[in-house]
């Protein structure tokens, strides 16, 4: 059943951060997640990428941290910057995985969607594009690297 499939995936999951965030003591090199994802799939698992620290253009060169590594996670989680201070989180996945979790007792949400939270999220996404914040992040990050490292 879908519930059993969801539980099985949950037990065989690998979670990572595209670029080291708050708790990352080790920066993953390019190619690392390619191998991890390959092994996880070989054993019937799913790959989850946490984009709380790196998502929404904060890297400058990439909108998502997983893009930096050239992988496509099965589930993407993000929070904080999607609401620009408003409590909001998101989870994106395929219809197959979403259905499997929807029919199980497992859940993975912090803040449920409501009209106000969705409006805050939409406004944040629009500001990222309209104010060219990804480009600014790239410019400032490049300047920082050139001057201080």
Image (tube, rainbow, N blue to C red):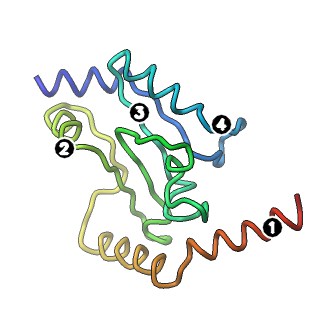
Residue labelled with disc 1: 144
For the residues labelled 1 and 3, the Cα–Cα distance comes to 32 Å
Query: Could you tell me which secondary element the residue under label 2 belongs to?
Result: helix
Which quadrant of the figure contains the N terminus? Answer: top left
- Residue 29, how many percent across, how many down? 67, 37
Judged from the image, the secondary structure of the residue bearing numbered disc 4 is: loop
Inter-mark Cα distance, 4 to 1? 21 Å
Q: Dot 3: what SS?
A: strand
Mark closest to the chain's N terminus, 4 or 3? 4
From the image, tell me which residue sits under label 4.
28
Q: Quick check: 124 left or right of 22?
A: left
Please name the residue that numbered disc 2 is placed on.
Answer: 95
Q: Determine the CA span between mark 2 and mark 4.
A: 29 Å
Q: Describe the element under mark 1 as helix, strand or loop.
A: helix
Mark 1 vs 3, N-terminal side: 3
Q: Quadrant of the C terminus?
A: bottom right
User: Mark 2 or mark 1: which comes first in sequence?
Assistant: 2
Q: Is residue 73 above or below residue 122?
A: above
**Where does residue 27 sit, x and y in percent of width and height?**
69, 39
Looking at this view, is 36 or 51 the one in front? 36
* Residue positioned 89% across, 63% down in the render: 148
Residue at mark 4 to residue at mark 3: CA–CA distance: 15 Å
The residue carrying pointer 2 sits among few (fewer than 14), some (14 to 19) or many (20 or more) residues within 10 Å by Cα, namely few
**Circle 3 Cα neighbour tier, 10 Å, few/some/many (<14 / 14–19 / ≥20):** many
Exactly how many numbered labels are in the figure? 4
The Cα atoms of the two marked residues, 2 and 1, are separated by 41 Å
Q: Which residue is mark 3?
A: 47
Q: Are marks 4 and 3 in contact (CB under 8 Å)?
A: no
Residue lying at 42% horizontally and 64% vertically, measured from the top left = 87
Cβ–Cβ under 8 Å for marks 2 and 3: no
């Amino acid at each position: 059943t879908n519930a059993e499939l969801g539980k099985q995936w949950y037990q065989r999951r690998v979670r990572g951060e595209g670029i080291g965030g708050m708790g990352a003591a080790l920066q993953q090199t390019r190619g690392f997640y390619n191998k991890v994802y390959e092994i996880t799939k070989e054993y019937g698992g799913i790959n989850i990428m946490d984009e709380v620290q790196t998502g929404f253009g904060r890297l400058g060169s990439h909108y998502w941290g997983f893009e930096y590594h050239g992988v496509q996670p099965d589930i993407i989680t993000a929070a904080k910057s999607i609401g620009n201070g408003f409590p909001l989180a998101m989870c994106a996945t395929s219809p197959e995985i979403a259905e499997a979790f929807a029919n199980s007792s497992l859940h993975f949400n912090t803040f449920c969607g409501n009209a106000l939270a969705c409006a805050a999220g939409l406004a944040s996404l629009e500001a990222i594009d309209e104010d060219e914040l990804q480009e600014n992040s790239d410019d400032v990050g490049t300047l920082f690297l050139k001057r201080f490292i």
